[in-house]
Image (cartoon, rainbow, N blue to C red):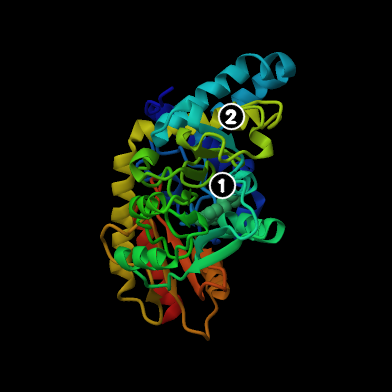
Amino acid sequence: MTFPSRSRRDFLSTLGALSAASVAVPPLLRGDAPSVVSPRAATSPRGLALAPDDFLLAPGLTYLQTGSLGPTPRPVLDATIAAWTTLEGDPAGQGYGPMEHAMEEVRAKAASFVGCKKEELVLTNCTTEGMNWVAQGAGLVAGDRVLTTDQEHPGGRVCWDYAARKFGVVLDIVEIPPGENDAQVIIDRFARAVTPRTRVFSFSHLLSSTGLRMPVAELSALARSRGCIAVVDGAQAVGGVAVDVKSLGCHVYATSGHKWMLAPKGTGLLYLSEELGTAIDPIALQSGRGAYTASSGVCSLPSVLGLGAAIDYLSTIGIARIESHNLELRQRLFAGLAGVPKLRVVSGGAGALASPLLSYVLPKDLTSGALHQRLRARHGVEVKVVPGNWFNGNRISTHLFNTAQDVDTLIQALRTELA
Ligand SMILES: Cc1ncc(COP(=O)(O)O)c(C=O)c1O
């Protein structure tokens, strides 16, 4: 399935419907959006979007929060709703028939999108679920050690805390201070922290806190050289940057559909390299890796079909083009923030470790939550509040639907608020 650009007439009629029908704008956003709505915000092309009205973002909202949840484009939403309507016409007939078959096709498409075989790819609800299955099924016993970092999101950390509590596994934590921007330093820290009992390396591809792109290939090679399993939490990567799990060399890679892939909420992927055999053997995979199995049960079929449509959407634009657009906007932001008082950018400049996520730290007397509220209420800009255990700051995501104007809007808003 591909999405040719729509005709101007379709586009204008959709715009008319958007402005006339308040239902198109969720109440929360209506309430939170700035009172002055720029008509340009609703009509201007959105970055690399295939059609100008593909994104349903509320007029006046500058959305820089894909790292938390991405906005699903209209054709993907339409495909999901159409699948839902079809399913409800004959639930069991469809769900265990043509739709089950269609989900297997999505699985194959998703596998090819991240560079593995269909048999190595499991559809999940989210990154967290994939990580949980891995920690539950890794067969770790008391005294085994897992090497991870102090920058893991709970979605990639809670599972190992569980393994520590339930199985007596010991966690070794590599520190990655905000501002770190040296791959070799990180690799050396991992190398020093490995022990003969280390069984698993578990780390993010792009750090949730600062967006730092971890040296996955080098860390995976190190893990392999010490006989360990390399587990990568790729929640912030797939869809925003090109990901090829085989060239990364990890054994496991978990990601979410509902962030950078712009797929329906509650979708995800888990890559389990075939070389693992049954080394990762959780309850949910007892009956195989299919979209529906006796051990995994029924999932949200329409959402899975929507995931397939999202992969088509991204592929039609091209992931290399998306990555370079995202990084270009990120660099524009990096340069623009240099002139904003009071904040300190903790993500590095352009280079191999840069990603479409960028974070800054604020002075103690201004909490990131308070600034977030002001950006949202006064300027219609949505950014992420970085959890306080990492630092007092915000994180910005730049994705395919964002524009230079979005970035400039944020910079101007920050200049105003921090003056
Ligand atoms: C690095 C990382 N891992 C895991 C997650 C959790 O994602 P999900 O809720 O889709 O499982 C996030 C969410 O922001 C994340 O940034």
Q: Nearer the viewer, residue 107 or 230?
A: 230
**Is residue 257 visible to the viewer in this orientation of the structure?**
yes
Q: Which residue is mark 2?
A: 289
Q: Residue at x 51, y 75 (%)?
A: 391
Q: To which quarter of the image does residue 4 belong?
A: top left
| Extreme residue toward the front, this view | 196
Classify mark 1 as within 8 Å of ligand 1 or not, answering yes or no: yes
The residue carrying pointer 1 sits among few (fewer than 14), some (14 to 19) or many (20 or more) residues within 10 Å by Cα, namely many
Residue 50, percent from left and from top: 38, 34
Q: Label 1: which residue?
A: 127
**Residue reaching furthest to the bottom:** 365
- Residue found farthest to the left: 351
In the picture, the quarter occupied by the C terminus is bottom left
Q: How packed is label 2: few (under 14 Cα within 10 Å), some, or many (20 or more)?
A: many
Q: Which mark is residue 272?
A: none
- Can residue 75 be seen here? The reply is no
* Ligand 1 has an atom within 8 Å of the beta carbon of the residue at disc 2: no
Secondary structure beneath dot 1 equals: helix
Mark 1 and mark 2: Cα distance apart in space: 16 Å
The answer to whether the residues at label 1 and label 2 have Cβ atoms under 8 Å apart is no
The quarter of the picture where the N terminus appears is top left
Q: Nearer the viewer, residue 222 or 65?
A: 222
Task: Tell me which corner region of the image, top left, top right, bottom left or bottom right, holds residue 12.
Answer: top left
Towards the viewer: 149 or 340:
149
Out of 249 and 362, give the one closest to the viewer: 249
Q: Position of residue 351 (x, y in %)?
A: 26, 60
Q: Secondary structure at mark 2?
A: loop
Which amino acid, by three-letter code, is at mark 1?
Thr
Up the image or down, 170 lies above or below 56; here it is below
Residue at 43% in and 69% down: 176
x, y percentage for residue 99?
Answer: 61, 19
